[in-house]
Every structure is written in structure tokens, then in C-alpha cells.
Image: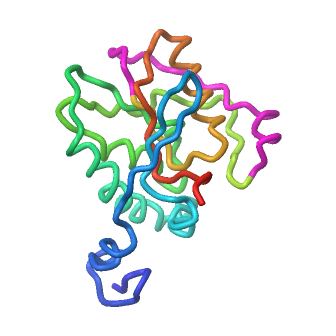
Amino acid sequence: MKCLMCESFSLTHICSTCQTTFLTPSIYKRKILNNIEVISFYKYRDIKTLLHTKHTDLGYYIYSILAKNSLKFFADEFSYPDIITSIAVDDYAHNGYSHTAVLNKALKNKCIIPKFNKLRAKNRVSYSGKSREFRLLNPREFQLKDIDTNEVILVDDIITTGLTLNSAIKTMQNNNKNTLFCITLADASLN
């Protein structure tokens, strides 16, 4: 097959050269509700086209590559004295897979245990491309299924306004869970 970025022959959808050149992650941090840190690895504008593949069958492969280059790399370096649960934000499957579940799976290490199908939105409306006002008028209304640890990491693909993660954090608090931090692939607020 051909690399989607340079069109060279490749055994993966994005060749190793393009992964090194264009998909080497950086660490970007911002604070949201209750001063909780959100760690992101890319500027949204730099990987926008790749992120939009989540709405297609190709998205599974692209998100797997992005997860390997960023979240797995992070997990390999991260340690914590206790066991932590990582939870994908609304890991509902579309097009045969869940893009947030793909990201969450990459976080597994000795102290991070990814859990799936734990935080689901009752409101299935898509926020993609929508304004802050639209998001405020259509809250996600998350429901948390039982998890056995008290400390969690929330995982999502993009942070834009922060409303989704804020809502997820509030749901954790309402269920006596402590959100240590959030992880996203990309931050849309970065220039």
C-alpha cells in the first residue's frame, strides 16, 4: 500500500518516515475545571485531516498509529504508586470501532488499567464543528458505570472548549472518583 502522507510504498497507512517527521508528539498542557490538567500531544491544526478519519473505516488505523506514537509513548514513561483506571470519554462504537477506546487501550501499563464502556453520554448529539453555545445547550449528560478504583485518567481525542471533559470530571466527582488528569490527542486552542 502507499503512505497516506507521502505516497511511498509502506506496510502501514503512514510510513515510518512520515510518522517520525510529522507525528512525533510534543507535550501541551492546559488547565480546566478544578485546575485539572489536560495533556495533549498535537496541535489540532497539525493533524486535523487525520483526526477527521474517525468518521470513516480508515480511522481505526489512523487512530491506532496516533495512539502508538503519543499515548503509548506516554504510558511507557509514566509511573504512579497506585493502580489508576483510564476511561475513554463516551467510547461508543461508530463505523465498527470507538476512536476513544483505541486511544484508551494504548495507555495500558503497570499502573494504568484501561476500562471500556464505563462513561457514556445519554445525549448522543455530535459536538464536531459545533459552537460553544450549541454545546452548552446540548449537554452530554454522562453516566458512569461502576469502576473499582478511585483515581482515574479521562481520555478523549480533542479538547476544544473543554466542556466535554468538564462534564466528565463532574460525573467523576458525583461518583466519588478523583480525576488525576485528562489526556487528549490534540488541543484545538493551540496556534
Residue 97 appears left or right of 76? right
Quadrant showing the C terminus: bottom right
Residue situated furthest left in the rendering: 110
Residue located 43% across and 17% down the image? 178
| Rendered position, 64 above or below 58 | above
| Rendered position, 182 above or below 13 | above
Q: Tell me which segment is drawn in magenta.
A: 130-152
Residue 144 image point, x, y percent: 51, 21
Residue located 51% across and 11% down the image? 175
| Residue 169 located within the stretch drawn in magenta | no
Numbered disc total: 0
Residue 76 image point, x, y percent: 20, 45
Q: Quadrant of residue 60?
A: bottom left
Residue 101 appears left or right of 95? left
Quadrant showing the N terminus: bottom left
| Rendered position, 21 above or below 190 | below
Residue 46 image point, x, y percent: 52, 67
Residue situated furthest bottom in the rendering: 8
Q: Nearer the viewer, residue 51 or 122?
A: 51
